[in-house]
Each structure stands twice: as C-alpha cells, then as structure tokens.
Image (cartoon, grey):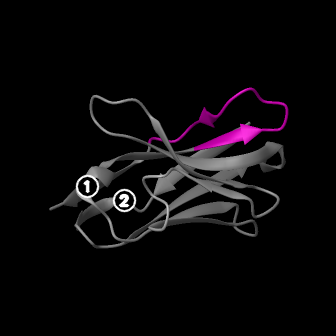
Amino acid sequence: QVQLEEAGGGLVQAGDSLRLSCAASGRTFQIYKIAWFRQAPGTERDFVASITWGGDNTDYADAVKGRFTISRDKTKNTMYLQMNGLKPEDTAVYYCGIFQYGGSGYMYGGQGTQVTVSS
C-alpha cells in the first residue's frame, strides 16, 4: 500500500506562486504515475497534472498549462506542483493520486491541501 500526504497550500493573491508537495511512502515501487487533482466546492475532482514515477513524462490540464509545473524527487519520494500566476479560479482543495502498475484508475489517500487565491 502507498500512503500520500499533501502539503503547501495557503491563501495567496492573484498572480502569486505556491509550491505544493506530495510525499509518498510505503510500497512506492508500485507507482507508475502520480498526479495532482483539485476539487472546488460543488464541483467534481478535476485532473491538474501528472508525471510518470520512473521517468519524466508529464501531462497538464489545459487550464494550467504554462503556469504550473509538476516534478518529482525520487530520492525523497516526493512530488511537487509549482504554481505560478495563480488565479481565483485555481481555488480548490488539491489532492495527489497514484496510478499503480496493473491498476485501473487513480487512487487517493491524503486529506488534500487547500489553495485559496484572492482577487
């Protein structure tokens, strides 16, 4: 099993930056891909960005392309999301999820971290 813990959220103003982190522990060798999702009140959880655990293949939602950068440090079993040029519509709880080898979908485990962007 893999445990996930998100951190780094906060209250910022439009145009500011934040860096989120997601620490993975446990059977991390099972991870094929790790990703960020976000959920605003009253909406579904949306994909933000992903990166393969063993390589550097990345993918981004159109809404964040050019502003957010996903990365991971395998020595620390930690994934990051650098968010620049934040907008009020980025306000949400951000979650990390993993796609395991042989899995059929993303799995979540952390409590998420709140990001609030004021205009």
The chief SS type of the magenta part is loop
Q: Real-space Cα distance between discs 2 and 1?
A: 8 Å
Q: Quadrant of residue 84?
A: bottom left
Q: Quadrant of residue 97?
A: top right
Q: Is residue 35 left or right of residue 41?
A: right
Q: Which residue is mark 1?
A: 116
Q: Position of residue 30 (x, y in %)?
A: 82, 43
Q: Is residue 82 visible?
A: no
Q: Is residue 40 left or right of residue 99?
A: left
Disc 2 marks which amino acid? Gly
How crowded pointer 1 is (Cα within 10 Å; few <14, some 14-19, many 20+) is rated as many
Asked if the magenta segment contains residue 102, the reply would be yes
31 is higher (above) or lower (below) than 13: above
Residue located at (30% from left, 61% from top): 10
Q: Position of residue 13 (x, y in %)?
A: 20, 68
Q: Position of residue 116 (x, y in %)?
A: 25, 55
Disc 1 marks which amino acid? Thr
State which region is magenta.
Answer: 97-111
Asked if the magenta segment contains residue 29, the reply would be no
Q: Quadrant of the N terminus?
A: top right
Residue located at (36% from left, 59% from top): 9
Q: Nearer the viewer, residue 66 or 33?
A: 66
Q: Which residue is mark 2?
A: 9
Is label 2 in contact with label 1 (beta carbons under 8 Å)?
A: yes
> Is label 2 in a helix, a strand or a loop?
loop
Q: Position of residue 19 (x, y in %)?
A: 45, 68
Q: Is residue 99 left or right of residue 36?
A: right
